[in-house]
Image (cartoon, rainbow, N blue to C red):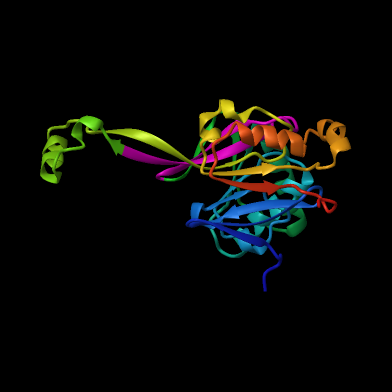
Amino acid sequence: MPSHNLARIQIEDLDLLGYSIAGEETVIAMPQLDVCFDIGKAPDQVIAINTVLLTHGHMDHSAGFAYYLSNRNFSGMSPGTIVAPANLIVPMREIITSWGYLDGNKIPANLVGVRPGDEHQIKPNLFARAFPTKHSAGSVGFTVLEKRRKLKPEYLQLTGPQIVELKKQGVQIDNPIEIPIVSYLGDTQYVDFSQLDYVKSSKILIAECTFYELDHEGRAQAGRHMHIKELADLLAALQNEHIVITHTTQRTP
């Protein structure tokens, strides 16, 4: 029986599996991409996912990271990879070491520190790119992009054998392209993310919106979160096909 009752959303050929309530827990997994955005309380449904993209260190987003790593080890899996803001790596290692003492077993881990603009390969044709957010020290969001190659326009009318012959001659017949699949903002106050083309054009945008009451704009600013009015402004400048809202509260209508 699953440890958590996670919501499931299907968007074309991708599944989103997760739970997100502000101050309680946020964990959003995309099994087909083999990534989990934030790790919440590490529900057992996400343990088999090999890469966790951690946006910041607040407990409701990060508390389960040591359990995730330990459970993978207990289950005979390879060490999990957690990609996190660079300033969190040292304290995360200290936590893993302390839990190892308590548990009586060393907890294997692959921790990767990133700063805005850094990239991490997930699969041969898939990678994550970190971008800056405004929430806590070092906080980042992530875009998962697919690498493809596109035939150059001048070769589009060629037959298969002609293309093969050009390849044999060492002719570069295609160009590398990047397809942004999903962007996850994590927790953040309003930022004009339309300045980042890969966020602007991601097929899926996963965005937080914590405050909805008209008189709560000040609270949103104080906590460095998004208010519904700011979310509307943000979305108006983006071109995403699908929008998923996270980090609501128990009071959200």
Q: Is residue 222 above or below residue 57?
A: above
- What secondary structure predominates along the stretch shown in magenta? strand
Quarter of the figure that contains the N terminus: bottom right
What residue appears at the point 70 percent right and 48 percent down from the top-left corner?
246
Question: Farthest bottom residue?
Answer: 1
What are the residue bounds of the magenta stretch? Answer: 124-149
In reply to whether residue 127 is colored magenta, the answer given is: yes
Question: Farthest top residue?
Answer: 195
Total numbered circles: 0
235 lies left or right of 198: right
In reply to whether residue 187 is colored magenta, the answer given is: no
Q: Is residue 116 above or below residue 28?
A: above
Q: Nearer the viewer, residue 57 or 66?
A: 57
175 lies left or right of 95: left
Q: Is residue 226 visible?
A: no
Q: Is residue 68 above or below residue 116?
A: below
Residue 9 at what x, y percent from top left?
A: 60, 58
247 lies left or right of 142: right
What residue appears at the point 62 percent right and 63 percent down from the top-left corner?
45
